[in-house]
Image (tube, rainbow, N blue to C red):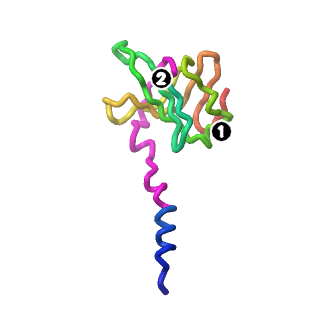
Amino acid sequence: MRVPWAVCGVCVLLCAPLVAHHSFGDMYLESDSVEIEGTIVEFQYKNPHAWVFVEAPDTFGQEKIYGAEWVSTSQLERAGITKSTLKTGDRVRIWGSPSKKPTEAKIHLKRMQRSDGWEWRGRANAPR
């Protein structure tokens, strides 16, 4: 029996996003942790992962923009987080794993606390 080419094409299209998605372990040193404290300059509420960009001092005290890669919007929505939860100018503290590339100011966001006491602690926990 021959499989129609259209069926093969559909299978390829459906599987492509699975291949394109990366593991956080491929990009970040998951066994290490870093902490930054600063001001949100941008919040990108999008898929496949939301991003929080924070201006914070580096280890030398120089201001730098850090990109913190969060989880998907569907995971954030389940935790009650919307695109209006974080705003430019909010003061935050972020804990996470650093990039495997030392020259990249990227973090895999694991925990975040806003200066007003709002807090997010990992994928399974709702905001506190």
Q: How many discs mark residues in the rendered view?
A: 2
In the image, 125 versus 91, the foreground residue is 91
At 37% from the left and 12% from the top, the residue drawn is 61
Sequence-wise first label, 2 or 1: 2
Residue 113 coordinates in the image, percent (x, y):
58, 22
Q: Judging from the image, what secondary structure is the residue with disc 2 in?
A: strand
- Residue 13, labelled with which disc? none
**Location of mark 1 (residue):** 77
- Tag 2–tag 1 contact (CB < 8 Å): no
Q: Quadrant of the C terminus?
A: top right
Q: Quadrant of residue 99?
A: top left
Q: Quadrant of residue 117?
A: top right
Q: Is residue 2 above or below residue 66?
A: below
Q: Amino acid at mark 1?
A: Glu
Taking the magenta stretch, the answer to whether it contains residue 22 is yes
Q: Amino acid at mark 2?
A: Val
**Location of mark 2 (residue):** 54
Residue 110 coordinates in the image, percent (x, y):
52, 32
At 62% from the left and 25% from the top, the residue drawn is 119
Q: Judging from the image, what secondary structure is the residue with disc 1 in?
A: helix
Taking the magenta stretch, the answer to whether it contains residue 38 is yes
84 left or right of 93 in image: right
- Spatial CA distance of label 2 from label 1 is 21 Å
Residue 44 coordinates in the image, percent (x, y):
53, 33
At 59% from the left and 20% from the top, the residue drawn is 114
Instruction: State which region is magenta.
Output: 15-41
Crowding near the residue tagged with mark 1, few <14, some 14–19, many ≥20 C-alpha atoms within 10 Å: few
Q: Residue furthest top?
A: 61
Crowding near the residue tagged with mark 2, few <14, some 14–19, many ≥20 C-alpha atoms within 10 Å: many
At 45% from the left and 46% from the top, the residue drawn is 23
Q: Residue furthest bottom?
A: 1
